[in-house]
Amino acid sequence: MTITGTVAEDTVVPAGTGWGRVVRRGQHVRIVDLEGKQAVDFLCYDAANPEERYNAADTMKYAGTIFLTTGHAIYSDLGRPLFTIVADTCGRHDTIGGCCSAESNLKRYDKPGPGNCRDTFITVLKRFGLGKKDVVANLNWFMNVPVDPDGRMQLAEGISKPGDYVELRAETDVLTVISNCTQLYNPVNGFDPTPVRVIVFDPPGR
């Protein structure tokens, strides 16, 4: 996998852990599904004013679809693009399923789980002075949530292959947070959570 530009960070994020940093305007962040079929929960905020943050409903409305891919923007609740998707080798990501939590695991599966994405989000957000109240409906890279014609949704096994990636360009300085999902009770990780790689870089000419 070739990166053209100057790498600012290249990190492997194990399943069940999180990652966060401010991605500067014009920088790219590439999220790589190293082994395939791994859901990556994602949130983002305006770094200068984190009260402005990713808005799932508006992002879907502006895109005209629930399935985001190359060319779509990720919008804040003030109608500003925080990121633009500039590359996508998978083509299937989830905008409606949200993140798992101990409470939702308990309700759906009668056990809270060894870990969950909401708690991981909270742990990472604390480093930036944010907390539980700042966890909003999130985006899930590589997570496969098909919707049937009758409106029924499924949490299905992912279709991403080893090495598939999504690449985003920051349209402003963006506080970017991920939780690499550790879900074991449904097939979104193929019942085998695996690590992902996060690369932040300055493209040529920036």
Image (cartoon, rainbow, N blue to C red):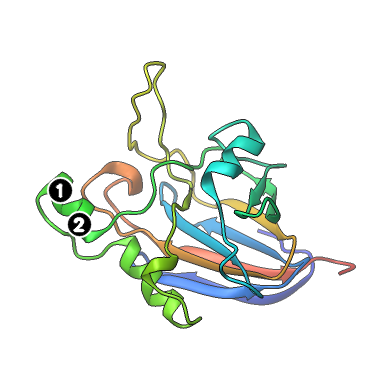
User: What crowding class fits label 2: few (fewer than 14 Cα within 10 Å), some (14-19), or many (20 or more)?
Assistant: some
Q: Position of residue 88 (x, y in %)?
A: 63, 45
Marks 2 and 1 close (CB-CB < 8 Å): yes
- For the question of whether residue 204 can be seen, the reply is yes
User: What is the distance, in whole Å, between disc 2 and disc 1 at their CAs?
Assistant: 6 Å
| Residue at the limit of the structure toward the left, as seen here | 110
- In this picture, is 6 found above or below 43? below
For disc 2, the marked residue is: 103
Q: Position of residue 34 (x, y in %)?
A: 48, 57
Task: Name the amino acid, label 2.
Answer: Glu
Q: Position of residue 141 (x, y in %)?
A: 50, 50
| Residue at the limit of the structure toward the top, as seen here | 149
Task: Name the amino acid, label 1.
Answer: Lys
Quadrant location of the N terminus in the rendered image: bottom right
Circle 1 SS class: helix
Q: Residue at x 43, y 41 (%)?
A: 96
For disc 1, the marked residue is: 107
